Image: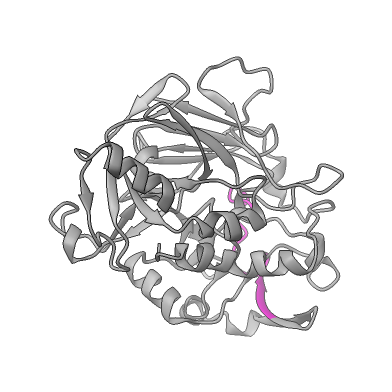
Amino acid sequence: MHTDYLTIKYLNMKIIFISFCIAISLRGLGQNVSDELTKPTYLPSELIDGRFFLNMPTITNDTIVGFCDTGGGYTAIYYKTLQKLKLETKIIDVEIKGEKTNFIFAKDLFDNKQIPYPTIGNYYKADINYPFFEIPDTSERMDLFSKCVPHDVFLGQFFFINKAWTFDYKSGKLFVNTPISTNAKDENTQPIGFKKDREGNKRFGHPSMKIVVDGETIDVLFDTGATLLLGENSKTEFGNKKATGGSFIARSIFDIWHKQHPDWRVIEKGESTGADIIEVPQVKVGNLTAGPVWFAKRPDEAWSKGMIGSMDKVVKGAIGGSFLQYFKVSIDYNSELIKFEH
């Protein structure tokens, strides 16, 4: 989002910081009964400007909107949302390793068995033993993002981990419980990588995958929440939108593309943060090619010193709605596979 990747994808919503202090293990995870479902399940959702938003019925008979961000750090509900639902009395605060955390149990927010509860890690289990939503402190940056991308709940990596999903950008539909067989022999199905502990358990849920641009294979984060915060210079191109689904690329690669392909369109300061964006004519996965695709420039350090904290390798960017819009995408966190279909 910002030129520092919105402080490394919202500081990975505290999860990145915590990871430097203590290893997170996902064994013994709290599960929702919905995990027992085996049939593909459609989830009420909307595809808006290249990003999915989940409509979540609450125990107060309201509906709140969850922003689906596989590249996000935590799973959170905003205090203003709890005020709107009159659920402030359900807020619990604990101190974990000297750091205060406010949260609400997922069961106190919704009990729709088709919508899974977030996963919890052993880091929290001594203090929080049931799936929960964190309540983040307000900040100027998050306020800006919330205004550009209206939502009530942030659904990050630990909402999606350990399940199988289909993001059908062609029909605008979102499904859960759509596994991919480990025996799949499909050129358009590729393995995804995760940061793991010595026993092979996932520590984080940020998937790495590969794309090909101009004949070069590039490792990227699968990031359904990647968002371009649009500035004055890109208003005409994007129809006066404040934000849209995008993709990101490291500055070093952005500069090579721009030098080798001066005909590729560049909008200087295309984002409100001052970041340049470039239109890549074609991007390839497997034997499928689609485009054009807009990428925003991000510092190399955002990947090599930031996102590496929650990923299995140093990636060079994130692939989001500006590319995913052309596909039906299935991702299985258990078989560690992702499949693209036109």
In front: 332, or 18?
A: 18
Residue at the limit of the structure toward the left, as seen here: 236
Q: Quadrant of residue 324?
A: top left
Looking at the image, can residue 20 be seen? yes
* Residue 316 percent coordinates (x, y): 50, 46
Magenta highlight range: 101-118
Residue 284 shown left or right of residue 193 in the figure: left
Residue 119 belongs to the span the image colors magenta? no
Q: Is residue 269 left or right of residue 117?
A: left
- Corner quadrant of residue 135: bottom right
Q: Residue 132's x, y, as percent?
A: 68, 66
Residue projecting furthest to the top: 185
The N terminus: image quadrant:
bottom left
Locate residue 49 relative to residue 75 in the image: left or right: left
Inspect this view and state whether residue 64 appears: no
Residue 106: say if magenta.
Answer: yes
Question: Which residue corresponds to the image point at 50% horizontal and 60% vertical from the top-left?
Answer: 57
Residue shown at 16% from the left, 51% from the top: 237
What residue appears at the point 35 percent right and 48 percent down from the top-left corner? 255
In this orientation, which residue lies closer to the viewer: 89 or 164?
164
Looking at the rendered image, the quarter that the C terminus falls into is top left
Q: Position of residue 15 (x, y in %)?
A: 66, 65
Q: Give above or below for 334 relative to 133.
A: above
Q: How many marks?
A: 0
